[in-house]
Image: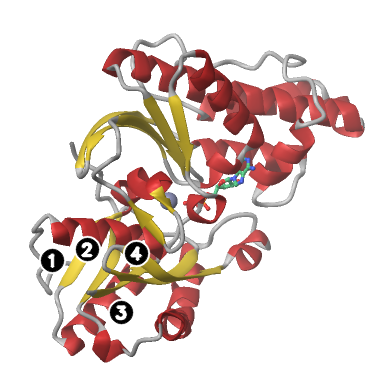
Amino acid sequence: MNLLAIETSCDETSAAVIRDGAVISNVVSSQMDMHSEYGGVVPELAAREHLKNLQPVIDKSLVEAGIKSTDLDAVAATRGPGLPSALRAGFGVAQGFAYALGVPFYGINHHEAHLYSPWIAGDPLSADFENMPANISLIVSGGHTMIVHVKGSLQHEILGGTVDDAAGECFDKTAKLIGLPYPGGPEMDRLAAEGDPLKYPFPRPMLKDPNYDFSFSGLKTSVRYHLEKHPEILEDGQSIRDLCASVQWAIVEVLCKKVMRAVRKMGVTCVTASGGVTCNRGLRAELQRECEKRGVSLRLAEPKLCTDNAAMIGILAAEKIKAGAEPTPHDVEAHPGWALSG
Ligand code: KG4
Ligand code: ZN
């Protein structure tokens, strides 16, 4: 069975072909350079770029898979959550494509796809859903921060999430205060490697609250106040590195402590993570350290699958089809605010 998957929830235009549960092609066209000029993703520009890129990206994914559109048996696309105009671009094209080909269409939840992306591995890439242990899954990116208890294939319970900014957003916004280019996360990671994480004791928002929720907007505000009081920090290279390390550690510590609390409470022996912030070396190292300490296995999404991609949308769609999911009716629209339920 050949399935075409499309993802356009934010600033990546991506198309993938999944054949019998394996990723045969996964083409990702990033708009990062265009948005970095504006210091963040501009939704209307993202939608316009998606519309421009969708056809070539789909064509490339079909060519790389060695098939024609008429060989497709199903089409899937991210239905939500995401930027409304960006989502609608990919969802509408995918829906129209399925309709024209007369094949079933599946609208997929972007967060649900992230949950399984750490399990996509091997050559060709595929996910062994049957042998996946129950796990605590951390989704951390510019748009999302969530802790989910994945009990098995297509079974999950959301434990918590951010009440304001996402972790990646916090990296990007504090990086902007420091004067780093967008997206600030990777640059902050680089500078933090040579800084002292204990130099500036920024608050650990909601760390003590007995839940799995996060709040990162206060952290950004306290960095701003600190810099207003001590502008000299920005004139000294080492102080900037210390500041980056301290901000990073404040984010990483809260994320890891809450993940490990969920591990203990739910009695699982496996942690997974996906989303752009999973590339952060401080987060990876701390998750590794905490998991090793507790004899818990850690599974991080492959770097190319950490950021948004259609492969994870297609892999989840294929698993849903295998489990007997009904196609999404052709008159259903994209759902930008579609919160993951469960
Ligand atoms: O998953 P992603 O590509 O897009 C969405 O937001 O959906 O994630 C991008 C986010 C940005 O906020 C970026 O700064 C952050 O991930 N990021 C990082 C690192 N690499 C990417 N944050 C911290 N350290 C990194 N190494
Ligand atoms: Zn995402």
N-terminal of the pair, mark 4 or mark 2, is 4
Of 224 and 24, the residue lying toward us: 24
Q: Which residue is mark 2?
A: 107
- Cα distance between the residues tagged 2 and 1: 6 Å
N-terminal of the pair, mark 1 or mark 3, is 3
Rate crowding at label 2 as few (under 14), some (14 to 19) or many (20 or more) other CA atoms within 10 Å: many
Q: Residue at x 47, y 31 (%)?
A: 298
Marks 2 and 1 close (CB-CB < 8 Å): yes
Question: Image height check: is 256 above or below 152?
Answer: above
**Disc ID at residue 22:** 4
Q: Residue furthest right?
A: 236
Q: Residue at x 73, y 20 (%)?
A: 197
Q: Which residue is mark 1?
A: 328
- Cα distance between the residues tagged 3 and 2: 12 Å
Horizontal side of 82 relative to 198 (left or right) equals left
- Cα distance between the residues tagged 4 and 2: 19 Å
**Disc ID at residue 93:** 3
Residue 29 locus on image (x, y percent): 53, 71
Question: Residue flagged by tag 2: what amino acid is it?
Answer: Gly
- Cα distance between the residues tagged 4 and 1: 22 Å
Question: Residue flagged by tag 4: what amino acid is it?
Answer: Ala
Q: Which quadrant holds residue 259?
A: top left
Of 115 and 230, the residue lying toward us: 115
Q: Residue at x 52, y 30 (%)?
A: 217
Question: Residue flagged by tag 3: what amino acid is it?
Answer: Val
Question: Image height check: is 7 above or below 145?
Answer: below
Marks 3 and 2 close (CB-CB < 8 Å): no
Marks 1 and 3 close (CB-CB < 8 Å): no
Question: Image height check: is 81 above or below 258?
Answer: below
N-terminal of the pair, mark 4 or mark 3, is 4
